[in-house]
Image: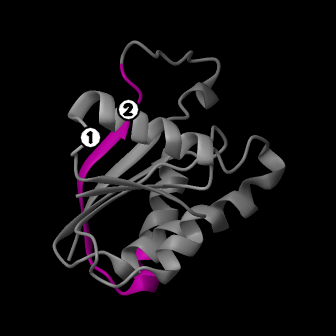
Amino acid sequence: SVHSVDISAAAIEQANRNVHTNFGPEAPHEGIREDCFKFLKEMDKGAYDLIVLDPPAFTKHISTVKKAARGYKEINLRALQKIEGGGLLYTFSCSQHISKDLFRKIVFGAAADAGREVRIVAQLEQAPDHPVSIFHPEGEYLKGLVLHVV
């Protein structure tokens, strides 16, 4: 089964509609309108063996990078504390001021704090049809990690 969690009622409604359209009304999907931080905090440990974290940009300005880094660490920490051993965590950032290197350090800091061993299965970035100008490296803002969590 699949649970989609978002604080936006409109986003949950759209997810439900998309699942119904593509997989039919009997698809094993539930849309949950909830703040994801709260959901992750309250969910049962081991309830999921696959978690996808795809939050909106936590920063749009260089002055808020520290606050955004705390947000990325917290959401990843909560997921890492709860995911079933042997599970996969897909985690993403679309904040242009959070570099790939910084994002990786944040996620690995969360893993260390959670006391979980993780292995990188894949490092993800935007597709080739979304090129990055060498003169605007911030355009390389889409980044993700696929982690095997022991």
Q: Does the magenta stretch include residue 116?
A: yes
Indicate the position of residue 36 as horizontal and vertical percent values: 54, 64
Q: In this view, does 4 lie above or below 142?
A: below
Q: Give the range drawn in magenta.
A: 109-127
Viewer-side residue, 103 vs 27: 27
Q: Which amino acid does label 2 sit on?
A: Asn
Question: What residue is at 41 percent from the left and 34 percent from the top?
Answer: 17
Indicate the position of residue 137 as horizontal and vertical percent values: 59, 27
Which residue lies under the disc numbered 2?
Answer: 18
> How would you rate the neighbour count of disc 2 (Cα within 10 Å): few for under 14, some for 14-19, many for 20 or more?
few
Indicate the position of residue 132 as horizontal and vertical percent values: 52, 19
Check the image and tell me how it is coloured: one colour
Number of marks in the rendered image: 2
Answer yes or no: is residue 109 visible.
no
Which residue lies under the disc numbered 1?
Answer: 25
Q: What residue type is labelled 1?
A: Pro
Question: What residue is at 21 percent from the left and 45 percent from the top?
Answer: 26
Q: Which element carries disc 2, helix, strand or loop?
A: helix
Viewer-side residue, 112 vs 44: 44
Q: Which element carries disc 1, helix, strand or loop?
A: loop
Q: Quadrant of residue 94?
A: top right
* Mark 1 and mark 2: Cα distance apart in space: 10 Å
Q: Quadrant of residue 90?
A: bottom left
Q: Does the magenta stretch include residue 18?
A: no
Q: Which of marks 1 and 2 is in front?
A: 1
Could you tell me which quadrant the C terminus lies in? bottom left
Answer yes or no: is residue 42 visible.
yes
